[in-house]
Amino acid sequence: MSTHSHYLAIDLGAESGRVMLGTLWEGRLTLEEIHRFSNGAVVIKGSRRWDLLHLYAEIVEGLRKAGARDLPIRSLSSDSWGVDYALMKGSEPFLTTPYQYRDERTDGSYERLGDVTREEIYAATGIQFMTINTLCQLHTDLLMRPEILKFADRFLLIGDTVNYLLGGDPVAEASLASTTQLFDPAKMDWARPLLARLGLPESIFPKVVPSGTVIGTLTPELQSETRLGAVKVVATCSHDTGAAVAAVPATDESGWAYLSSGTWSLLGVESPTPVLTEEARKLNFTNEVGYGGTVRLLKNIAGLWILQECMRFWRESGHDHTYTDLVNLALEAPALVSLINPGDARFLRSGGTTASGGMPAHIAEYCRETSQPVPETVGAIARCILESLSLLYRQSLGELEQLTGQTITRLHIVGGGTRNDLLNQCAASATGRRVITGPVEATAAGNILIQAIAGGSVASLTEARAIVARSFPQNTYEPQEPSVWEAAYARFTALP
């Protein structure tokens, strides 16, 4: 890599999106944010939807800004959250505005599947049971708007949809497809017998391609509009967590777990094969695909979403706190007073309106139900959330060791949550393991390095991770006060 190699990553998250410029030179990667834009559900006619037209327009604006740099861009790729999708017909970009995964239409979905059992679903897909899953959404379409499914000739998940709109083939990238609970991670293809059992039309399921596949070239109109020219479109890991895990700067093959920390906390290990045991099903672990056909054995945990919903409530109440404000206020509050189980259903949905008390009211309700002190201040509420998340990390790591037989000695935390020093220290103390944080922009880094592997500039995932380790700062947190946290964990595991 004696010359500069430039790539673009379109990284879409539940709160915001970015167009990132990545430059490889002399074994190091630099990242620059070219364009950032807002994202979020639009509530319309009683449903929660994604505004794809807004996202597309902002992406094109970011590509224009990149084109104005007059750099030789080798390729670009989009990544996104999982499970949500657009339905298409012919040249129509999408038939309806895509639902957001937190929409309540899928509540009770698994009870509506008739004689299709959870055991059957898990054996076929290895995906944990959450009503946000694509399985639940498409089956709800089948029941509530069957005419749309009959008219559509394919569906694409969000990251794949963006790649298609930019000029890629209408295909499903394996890491993103694996989030659907309709994908067989052993066969690396759609779980076709399950599709038939559910009555879903197999014709709408697109071809699956491996991570790092070149799928097309930027459309002629976008080449002209953005001045980028005939840039290749690559399906990297179209799932943001898959891309982030590819950028974990781990130096060996075992003894570590990863945590992608953001709106969701995704905690897991890399496995060469799916773990489809009854024990894994009962513990509700998921088998998602990673780069190179690896399996990300992980659990989806309701991460900083709970704190974000509190922040939204406080902002609408006239108190706009930054994350730094909240950490400082939390540090002033007493430690380990009140705990919640972040997996409780009330914390997975929107906190509701200001009039209802929002997410802080849900936390207060849970604490009253469990005979704990109700956190009254902003700092006490924030501390309750962060400490509870950390204890859930400990529980999940213990379950991972139980499932895999591995001893996990360190936890690599990547993503936006790495900026939260209090959460990182709580994670180390609660889990009793060394925590190593960084990079913050793991998803964009992984997206770009997989593009570089596809283009021949980087030899392997091992080399890509070495580049990450050289390119971005890392911080280390050691466990503190083990007896205090041991007592807190005993209280946590007794919570409903």
Image (cartoon, rainbow, N blue to C red):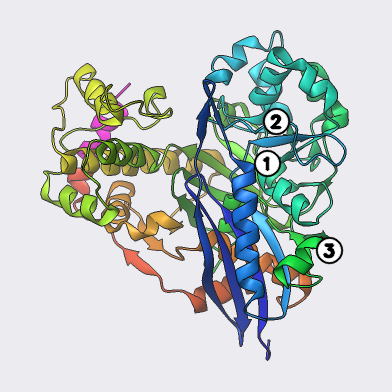
Residue 76 covered by magenta stretch: no
Checking the image for residue 479, the label placed there is none
Which quadrant of the figure contains the N terminus?
bottom right
Q: Amino acid at mark 1?
A: Pro
Q: Residue at x 41, y 23 (%)?
A: 345
CB of mark 1 within 8 Å of CB of mark 2?
no
- The CA distance from mark 1 to mark 3 is 41 Å
Asked if residue 217 shows in the view, the reply is no
Q: Residue furthest bottom?
A: 2
| Gap in angstroms between the C-alphas marked 1 and 2 | 34 Å
Indicate whether residue 487 is drawn in magenta.
yes
Q: Residues within 10 Å of mark 2 (few under 14, many from 20)?
A: few
Chief SS of the magenta region:
helix
Task: Say which label, 3 or 2, has the lower sequence index.
Answer: 2
Q: Amino acid at mark 3?
A: Pro
Highlighted magenta segment, given as a residue range:
486-496
Instruction: Give the CA separation, mark 3 to mark 2.
Output: 26 Å
Q: Residue at the far top: name it.
A: 114
**Residue of label 1:** 274
Asked whether, in this view, residue 424 is left or right of residue 402, the answer is left
Q: Is residue 232 above or below residue 171?
A: below
What amino acid is found at the position of numbered circle 2 in the picture? Thr
Above or below — where is 143 with respect to 62? above
Residue marked by disc 2: 96
User: Looking at the image, which is closer to me, 120 or 189?
Assistant: 189
Is the Cβ of the residue at disc 1 closer than 8 Å to that at disc 3?
no
Q: Which residue is mark 3?
A: 220
SS for dot 1? loop
